Image (cartoon, rainbow, N blue to C red):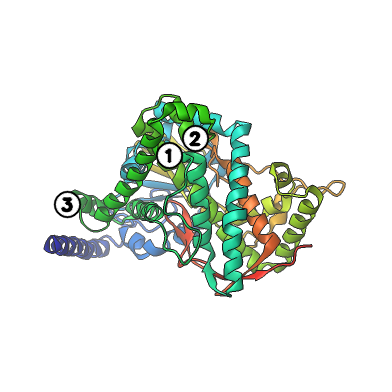
Amino acid sequence: MIFTFIASQTLTTAFFFTALYFLHLLKDKFSQQVVSFSGHGPPTYPVIGCLISFYRNRRRLLDWYTQLLSQSPTNTIVVWRLGARRTIVTANPENVQYMLRTNFKNYPKGRPFTEILGDFLGHGIFNVDGELWRTQRKLVSHEFSTNSLREYVMNTLHEEVENQLSPVMQSVLTENKVVDLQDLLKRLTFDMICKVSLGTADQHRSLDPTFPISPLAEAFDVSSEICARRGAATLSLSWKMKRLIRVGSERRLKAAVREVQGFVSRVIRDKITDMNQIAASGNDDLLSRLILAGHDERTIRDLMISFIMAGRDTTSAAMTWLFWMLSRHPNIKQDLVSEVELVVKRRKDLDYESLKELKLLKACLLESMRLYPPVAWDSKHAVEDDVLPDGTIVRSGDRVTYFPYGMGRMEELWGKDWFEFRPSRWFLKPEKGTREIRKMCPYKYPVFQAGPRDCIGKEMAFIQMKYVVASILRRFDIEPVNRGSPVFVPFLTAHMAGGFPVRIRRRNIL
């Protein structure tokens, strides 16, 4: 087995570099025949497309695409390279609205997307189209619209933050240790989303940073990372070959998916064994309701996995980047602490209604996600030939990507101060001493998607983030250990490379 692995890796590497050598020769041969399919984008040559420049920028694709988009008059580029589909990348709100709403039927996820994520997410809501997607969305949307679910979320938040997170942070403070805040928040959100969706927590869970990450949480991390690398691979053939012969990252992915699916399936079967107990218990978790509704085990399993992945990683990422931004803007942080203290003093507690009053906190979250969106980009695949509103020609089968990361950095959309962390941009002009959040066009700010596939968990996400951030700010001050700028890594959901090491200080509560 070891020799098979070494041989396969050697063959893959040799194949890649041999191909790259010939591509360089072709580039030289056609150096005078640069083609641009849209008039703007990376240098593109016959046969090889933009493969050379793509390979050179593969470790900084986000900033490379952003630069190219900012140079395009339409904020749209076309990327074509040997071994990959023709891809249209846009930061144009009119194009985004057209593909996410106006001509929604022509831009499904598509088979290429579902193939990349299929081993992990199966037929879950984030990886399907058509009637299966509509059925799952209708089912889950109903759950988010009930007051009982919101109350359950609040109960879960209170229990996890007050009884788990706060004691751990106090312990770290007392011992003057450095802690990875990103890891701590991921552990917290993982526990909470498991409780809301499955009605149970990971049996190996622990917020204590001295404990290793649970096998289940690690399996989610591995699955997410490897699937994301599939999508960003220079040549898709490389990961498909490894999957075929079951070596390297694809072998790790298979083991990780087995861990995830095994855990969720066990929880489902345990609940199914006593249907009377489920019905009598009045459980508010989504899993119990799906079982009672009569859905089959595989559908429930895939939906739960998608739900857990999205609910865990997106909110923890958003909170991590917000705490980093606040550490660089102490005046805004102090205003935010004052807002939290004022609301808690007036209402005596952080409940569902008091969270609505934290307007500055919501503005800070919106502004932080503008610069560091939890999902950096999202792609659809055209069913038929089409033309986008800016005149870009779309061919059947093209990958069409809208780009929240780049959109948050477009001067045309946000002005010359786009690079500044300025929560005030989210407020309407104050009237009679009150501040109201500006209703931003979702196609200009597609952090939560938009149109028929907009994020159904948006309200729950804001409730969770507001409660956790406000609870931390009331009690603690977060001081980053490193003063440099962290690296934004866009897997299926974005995270901070190397974690977010901080020291926790005590804050006096007024």
Inter-mark Cα distance, 3 to 2: 38 Å
330 in relation to 446, above or below: below
Inter-mark Cα distance, 1 to 2: 9 Å
Amino acid type, mark 1:
Met
The quarter holding residue 271 reads top left
Q: Quadrant of the C terminus?
A: bottom right
Q: Position of residue 445 (x, y in %)?
A: 59, 46
Are the two marked residues, 1 and 2, in contact with CB atoms closer than 8 angstroms?
Answer: yes
In this rendering, would 408 be left or right of 268?
right
Mark 1 surroundings: few (<14), some (14-19) or many (≥20) residues within 10 A: many
Amino acid type, mark 3:
Ile
The residue wearing badge 2 is 286
Mark 3 surroundings: few (<14), some (14-19) or many (≥20) residues within 10 A: few
Q: Position of residue 346 (x, y in %)?
A: 81, 50
Q: Which label belongs to residue 304?
A: 1
> If you read the primary sequence from the N terminus, does the residue marked by circle 1 or circle 2 appear first?
2
Are the two marked residues, 3 and 1, in contact with CB atoms closer than 8 angstroms?
Answer: no
Q: Residue at x 58, y 58 (%)?
A: 165
Q: Position of residue 72 (x, y in %)?
A: 50, 53
Q: Which label belongs to residue 245?
A: 3
Residue sticking out furthest to the top: 294
Q: Secondary structure at mark 2?
A: helix
Q: Secondary structure at mark 3?
A: helix
Amino acid type, mark 2:
Leu
The one of 426 and 35 positioned closer to us in this rendering: 426
The one of 233 and 24 positioned closer to us in this rendering: 233
The one of 177 and 109 positioned closer to us in this rendering: 177
The one of 315 and 237 positioned closer to us in this rendering: 315
Can residue 443 be seen at all in this image of the molecule?
no
